[in-house]
């Protein structure tokens, strides 16, 4: 059924057919143009991408790997000219480097890392800030843009706020506990009302190897976040990623990073006031009294939903006055009650159990061990909180809970055991005020295939077989207050469909109706999504195409460099598949959706 026929819907576009193949697909009447690919030049003098001869020096001047968060910061209020800010969450060695994969029986074996390979990976992490401009209806990067910048796992950063300078953040290389090299695993993020770029550090645990000294204070702290993990081999070449050698280094990651995108010489700030955990993102909104509220998900099974409220107020007339708002405020964690109310509990040193008796000597300790503090407050363990998006028009916020197949006991806010497909919660803050410490909530939708009764999906009956999805991850509220959701985890074998971008009605008779607008190539995850303020462009990020695509019958191949399941977007045998940012526009111009 065409979207236009759904009574009361805020959307009117022909739905894409869900499915799986090597290409991406957008709704009829729209163009989806690749804007930036891994390896593309970010500076006019950057070297061309040469996948067979990669180097860290080249990667530092080129677009990084695995684009996740995408933000658009208009320049001079324009809708056709601005800065695109993009997180590069992580690296997939088997998809990046030729000749490092061998097949032994059914096993895909990746060759041990080399120092140069690690250096390339570190340069492929972080973020990109690049000026972009629309000319003749098509977006292009401006390679001589004065604000263009690559941020990597070695960029010098400053720790600020209440935990800065704590003994627990000091290392031999940094006796002050305020200087860190780099940011890692930046998943989603945000753009603040004053135009800074927020990068959230998510799965930082995977980069640390080694063992802690027996008497270390950090044992319980690191166990709670999964350090060490050894997904990456960086610690073999860099002592700071080996906790046997630099025991405090993991305390310097897991923060929210704020970057002044307008000043390419600025030092990115790790804002400790927003807590340390596996930060999915940090989307913000200005409350009626001018304070700014950041919604924060901690993406792990049974972890929590947080928000941060600044002490100071936003000054729309003086950008400089807002630049340190994130150093002072209150961090809250959510308790979702069975009666449909939500309580925001402050994580403040000295209040309740957050005292020296429980190992919290200061606010710095509360922030460094945010999860343990929230455990003591008996916050509600959730089904993997991902992106959370406030809707400034309604005083509501949308929480993506991606899945949790280990849930054995349901509760009202996490209503399904073995929750394979995730759900979305809508929070209505008291009085529509985002700073409120209480509110109400309801489940907007339980995700999954509505035609399979045992799944228990609750999309509206107007939702077509293409319109349902599982595993909500990122989301956006556009200028018209409409909700868009991107997914991570729909797979050929699991759902018979790839990830994509879905439009979801949240108001009126069509509430709970979802429809597919864009879908990604096999193996990819859908990130972004970022509409321009005038809604004539939607930027989306296609992350890790071809990864795990081996379970798709018809491609039937492990996703290693020489024999990928898709070569999107170049479809050139000399090119690996490349994570890319795509700009979606309406043919002939006009508002999307
Ligand atoms: Fe990086 Fe929570 O997804
Ligand atoms: Ca995510
Ligand atoms: Ca978002
Ligand atoms: Ca995810």
Image (cartoon, helix red, strand yellow):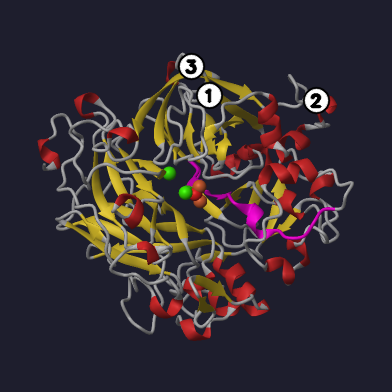
Label 3 CA crowd tier, 10 Å (few <14, some 14–19, many 20+): few
Which quarter of the figure has residue 520?
bottom left
Mark 1 or mark 2: whose residue is earlier in sequence: 2
Looking at marks 2 and 3 on the same chain, the residue that comes earlier in the sequence is marked by: 3
For marks 1 and 2, give the CA distance.
25 Å
Asked if residue 572 lies in the magenta stretch, the reply is: no
Residue 148 in the image: above or below residue 412: below
Give me the C-alpha separation between circle 3 and circle 1.
22 Å
Q: For numbered disc 3, what is the local secondary structure?
A: loop
Looking at the image, which residue sits at the far right? 215
Q: Residue at x 63, y 38 (%)?
A: 274
Residue 478 seen by the camera: no
- Frontmost of labels 2 and 3 is 3
Q: Which residues are magenta?
A: 190-212
Q: Nearer the viewer, residue 190 or 232?
A: 232
Q: Residue at x 51, y 27 (%)?
A: 409
Which residue is disc 2 drawn over?
Answer: 355
Task: In this rendered view, identify the residue nearer to me: 550 or 204.
Answer: 550
Residue at mark 2: C-beta within 8 A of ligand 1: no
Q: Is mark 1 within 8 Å of ligand 3?
A: no
Give the answer, above or below, for where 331 lies relative to 580.
Answer: above
From the viewer's perspective, tell me whether residue 329 is left or right of residue 167. Answer: left
**For discs 3 and 1, the disc positioned in front in the rendered view:** 3
Name the residue that disc number 3 marks.
Answer: 338
Residue occupied by mark 1: 435
Q: CA–CA distance between discs 2 and 3? A: 29 Å
Left or right: residue 460 versus residue 423 is: left
Above or below 386: residue 584 = below
């Amino acid at each position: 059924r065409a979207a236009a026929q759904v009574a009361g819907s805020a959307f009117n576009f022909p739905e894409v057919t869900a499915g799986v193949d090597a290409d991406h697909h957008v709704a009829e009447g729209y163009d989806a143009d690749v804007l930036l690919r891994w390896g593309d030049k970010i500076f006019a003098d950057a070297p061309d991408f040469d996948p067979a001869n990669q180097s860290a020096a080249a990667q530092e001047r080129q677009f990084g790997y695995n684009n996740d968060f995408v933000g658009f910061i208009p320049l001079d209020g324009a809708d056709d000219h601005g800065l695109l800010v993009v997180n590069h969450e992580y690296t997939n060695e088997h998809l990046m480097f030729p000749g490092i994969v061998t097949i032994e029986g059914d096993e895909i074996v990746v060759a041990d890392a080399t120092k140069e390979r690690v250096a390339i990976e570190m340069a492929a992490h972080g973020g990109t800030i690049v000026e972009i401009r629309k000319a003749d209806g098509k977006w292009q990067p401006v390679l001589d843009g004065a604000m263009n910048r690559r941020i990597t796992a070695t960029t010098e950063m400053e720790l600020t706020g209440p935990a800065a300078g704590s003994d627990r953040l000091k290392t031999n290389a940094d006796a002050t506990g305020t200087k860190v090299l780099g940011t890692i695993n930046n998943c989603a993020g945000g753009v603040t009302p004053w135009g800074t770029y927020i990068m959230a550090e998510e799965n930082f645990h995977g980069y640390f190897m080694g063992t802690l000294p027996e008497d270390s204070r950090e044992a319980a702290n690191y166990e709670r976040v999964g350090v060490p993990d050894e997904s990456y081999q960086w610690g073999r070449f860099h002592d700071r990623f080996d906790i046997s050698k630099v025991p405090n280094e993991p305390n310097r990651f897991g923060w929210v990073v704020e970057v002044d995108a307008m000043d390419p010489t600025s030092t990115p700030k790790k804002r400790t006031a927003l807590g340390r955990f596996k930060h999915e993102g940090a989307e913000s909104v200005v409350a009626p009294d001018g304070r700014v509220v950041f919604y924060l998900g901690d993406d792990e099974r049974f972890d929590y939903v947080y928000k941060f409220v600044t002490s100071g107020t936003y000054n729309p007339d003086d950008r400089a006055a807002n630049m340190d708002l994130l150093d002072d405020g209150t961090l809250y964690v959510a308790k979702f009650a069975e009666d449909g109310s939500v309580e925001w509990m402050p994580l403040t040193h000295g209040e309740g159990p957050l005292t020296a008796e429980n190992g919290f000597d200061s606010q710095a300790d509360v922030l460094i061990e945010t999860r343990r503090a929230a455990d003591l407050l008996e916050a509600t363990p959730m089904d993997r909180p991902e992106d959370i998006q406030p809707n400034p028009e309604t005083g509501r916020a949308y929480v993506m809970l991606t899945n949790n197949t280990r849930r054995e006991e349901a509760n009202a806010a996490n209503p399904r055991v073995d929750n394979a497909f995730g759900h979305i919660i809508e929070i209505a803050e008291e009085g529509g005020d985002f700073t409120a410490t209480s509110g109400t909530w309801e489940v907007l939708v339980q995700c999954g295939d509505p035609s399979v009764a045992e799944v228990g999906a609750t999309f509206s009956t107007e939702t077509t077989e293409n319109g349902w999805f599982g595993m909500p991850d990122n989301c956006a509220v556009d200028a018209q207050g409409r909700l868009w959701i991107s997914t991570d985890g729909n797979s050929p074998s699991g759902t018979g469909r790839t990830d994509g971008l879905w439009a979801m009605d949240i108001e009126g008779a069509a509430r709970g109706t979802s429809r597919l607008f864009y879908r990604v190539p096999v193996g990819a995850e859908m990130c972004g999504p970022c509409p321009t303020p005038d809604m004539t462009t939607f930027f989306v990020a296609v992350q890790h195409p071809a990864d795990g695509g081996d379970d798709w019958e018809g491609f039937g191949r492990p996703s290693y460099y020489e024999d990928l399941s898709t070569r999107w977007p170049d479809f050139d045998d000399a090119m690996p598949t490349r994570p890319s940012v795509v700009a979606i526009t309406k043919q002939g111009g006009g508002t999307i959706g």
